[in-house]
């Protein structure tokens, strides 16, 4: 009887480790299957996020929204190019001895002493500021040429010149990131001889190219020059040539 009892204990003792091993294997197999299912769910979620269309707009701190569609870094919207050319041309070729100065948050009109570009040569402050929209390889020579054209009466407040636009053509892509645009306008000169103003034809072909974003200066520490350059070049375009418009006739 004791021998039979010992034999039974021996059989039970052998079965218990086998049973525990099988349970452990089943548990680990089940856990691996659950992990596999979770990985499938996670992969599906990542794929949905990856294939989801990017948002077209983002909201700025002032509540406005802007378009953020992904585009070629050399692409510029045609209307943006035309606006850049017209605004730059207006500032370059509109001359007066009056300038609006920001003082304590309000605009004050003062006499413009101009900016010197060479000995005995100067241009209006607005023209000098706008010149940073030009490529640096011809900016200074261009300013010297404008200084020669500015009537001395400008500085005495007896002559004013402004641009009157007639037509601005659609930009023509001449190579990636480079465009040609034709400008047809008149320079209206108002002086003592012609108080009503006289028109001088001003027809030009302007070549524009895309540029990188200018570095953002630290506003608290930025100089007037740094702020001016950033403001003008934030359009991410520059004019690298201005020539007379050829007559198609």
Image (tube, grey):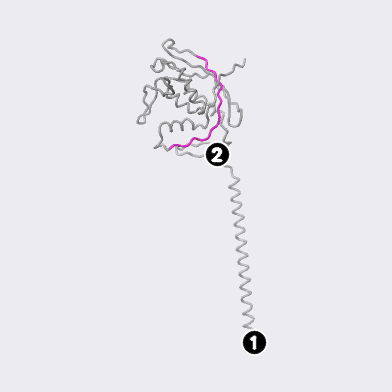
* Residue 53 found in image quarter: top right
Q: On the rendered structure, is 241 left or right of 194?
A: right
* Residue 82 found in image quarter: top right
Q: Position of residue 51 (x, y in %)?
A: 60, 45
- Find out whether residue 47 is within the magenta segment: no
Relative to 88, say whether 36 is above or below.
Answer: below
Q: On the rendered structure, is 168 left or right of 113?
A: right
Q: Which residue is mark 1?
A: 4
Q: Position of residue 157 (x, y in %)?
A: 39, 17
The quarter in which the C terminus is drawn is: top right
Q: Position of residue 136 (x, y in %)?
A: 50, 28
Hey, which residue is sitting farthest front in the picture?
Answer: 119
Residue drawn where x is 48% and y is 37% of the image: 215
- Find out whether residue 209 is within the magenta segment: yes
CA–CA distance in space, label 2 to label 1: 83 Å
Q: Position of residue 133 (x, y in %)?
A: 49, 28
Residue drawn where x is 36% and y is 31% of the image: 105
Task: Determine which of the numbered discs, if any, sits on residue 56 in the image.
Answer: 2
Q: Nearer the viewer, residue 94 or 170?
A: 94
- Tell me the magenta residue range: 200-217
* Residue 52 found in image quarter: top right
Residue drawn where x is 45% and y is 25% of the image: 128
Q: Secondary structure at mark 2?
A: loop
């Amino acid at each position: 009887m004791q021998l039979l009892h010992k034999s039974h204990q021996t059989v039970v003792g052998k079965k218990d480790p086998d049973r525990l091993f099988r349970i452990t294997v089943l548990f680990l197999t089940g856990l691996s299957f659950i992990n596999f299912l979770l990985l499938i769910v996670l992969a599906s979620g990542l794929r949905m996020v990856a294939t989801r269309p990017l948002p077209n707009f983002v909201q700025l701190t002032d509540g406005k929204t802007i378009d953020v569609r992904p585009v070629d870094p050399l692409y510029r919207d045609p209307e943006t190019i035309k606006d850049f050319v017209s605004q730059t041309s207006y500032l370059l070729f509109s001359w007066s001895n009056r300038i609006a100065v920001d003082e304590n948050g309000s605009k004050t009109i003062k006499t413009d002493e101009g900016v010197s570009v060479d000995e005995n040569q100067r241009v209006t402050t607005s023209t000098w500021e706008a010149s940073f929209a030009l490529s640096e390889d011809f900016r200074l020579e261009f300013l010297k040429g404008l200084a020669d054209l500015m009537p001395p009466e400008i500085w005495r407040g007896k002559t004013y010149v402004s641009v009157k636009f007639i037509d601005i053509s659609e930009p023509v892509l001449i190579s990636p990131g480079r465009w040609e645009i034709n400008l047809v306008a008149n320079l209206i000169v108002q002086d003592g001889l012609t108080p009503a103003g006289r028109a001088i034809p001003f027809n030009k072909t302007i070549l524009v190219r895309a540029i990188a974003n200018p570095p953002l200066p630290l506003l608290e520490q930025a100089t007037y020059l740094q702020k001016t350059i950033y403001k003008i070049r934030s359009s991410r375009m520059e004019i690298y040539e201005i020539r007379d418009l050829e007559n198609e006739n």
